[in-house]
Image (cartoon, helix red, strand yellow):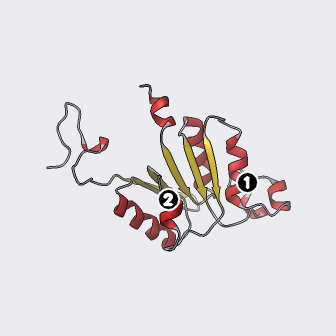
Amino acid sequence: MTKSLALAGKSALVIGAGGLGCPAALVLVEAGVGRVALADDDTVELTNLQRQVLFDERDVADAMPKAEAARRRIARVNSQVEVVAIVDDLNHRNIERHAAGAEVLVDGVDNFETRYLANDFAVKHAVPYIYGGAVGTVGAAFAILPHTTNNDAPWETLPGGSRATP
């Protein structure tokens, strides 16, 4: 199976459709990940336009929810990808529903409450979790690949079939 076909069967949840979530979602769609969901409950504001690449002045004028504006824009990039907008504040009451089926969580949020919530979901369900943060011109990204009960996840197997964990 080619790598692009392998990605076509995968699902990602991008949490936050701002300065980090927008480019992350765009790259996932360009790469051909089969389903990309974007979760954000904010609306597009004029101050977002200089750093949030999927929005324009019309989105501001229409008071468009970020998740929906981003969905409309990136859905035109690759028609083979299902792009879903989740216009909702992720919280302990709805994370299970909104993140169900996601095979990776990409965290581009600007608050620790949602970040901790996403991390808890990822640990509970052994889902890879990637987060990024930026302030001014300084940024950081970190990918967390959880161990599975049987140590049989692709990232736990080294070349030659040996296990990455004891």
Quarter assignment of residue 62: bottom right
Q: Residues within 10 Å of mark 2 (few under 14, many from 20)?
A: many
Relative to residue 13, is residue 149 drawn left or right?
Answer: left
Find residue 27 and name its label: none
Q: What x and y, as percent, mark residue 42?
A: 68, 67
Residue 148 location (% of width, % of height): 27, 53
**SS class, disc 1:** helix
Residue at (22% x, 48% y) in the render:
151
Q: Residues within 10 Å of mark 1 (few under 14, many from 20)?
A: many
Q: Nearer the viewer, residue 27 or 133?
A: 27
Observer-nearest of 12 and 57:
12
At mark 2, the secondary structure is: helix
- Residue at image location 45% in from the left, 29% down from the top: 3
Please identify, in this view, whether the residue under mark 1 or under mark 2 is nearer the observer: 2
Q: Estimate the x, y position of residue 162 in percent, counting from the top left.
A: 17, 37
- For disc 2, the marked residue is 99
- Where's the N terminus, which quadrant? top left
Residue 48 falls left or right of residue 139? right
**Whether residue 16 is visible:** yes
Q: Which residue is mark 1?
A: 69
Residue type pointed to by label 2:
Ala
Whether residue 53 is visible here, answered yes or no, is: no
Q: Amino acid at mark 1?
A: Ala
Q: Is residue 154 left or right of residue 29?
A: left
Q: Residue at x 44, y 49 (%)?
A: 103
20 to 118, vertically: above or below = above
Cα gap from disc 1 to disc 2, whole angstroms: 20 Å
Q: Nearer the viewer, residue 116 or 49?
A: 116
Count of marks overlaid on the render? 2
Residue 113 higher or lower than 142, as above or below: below
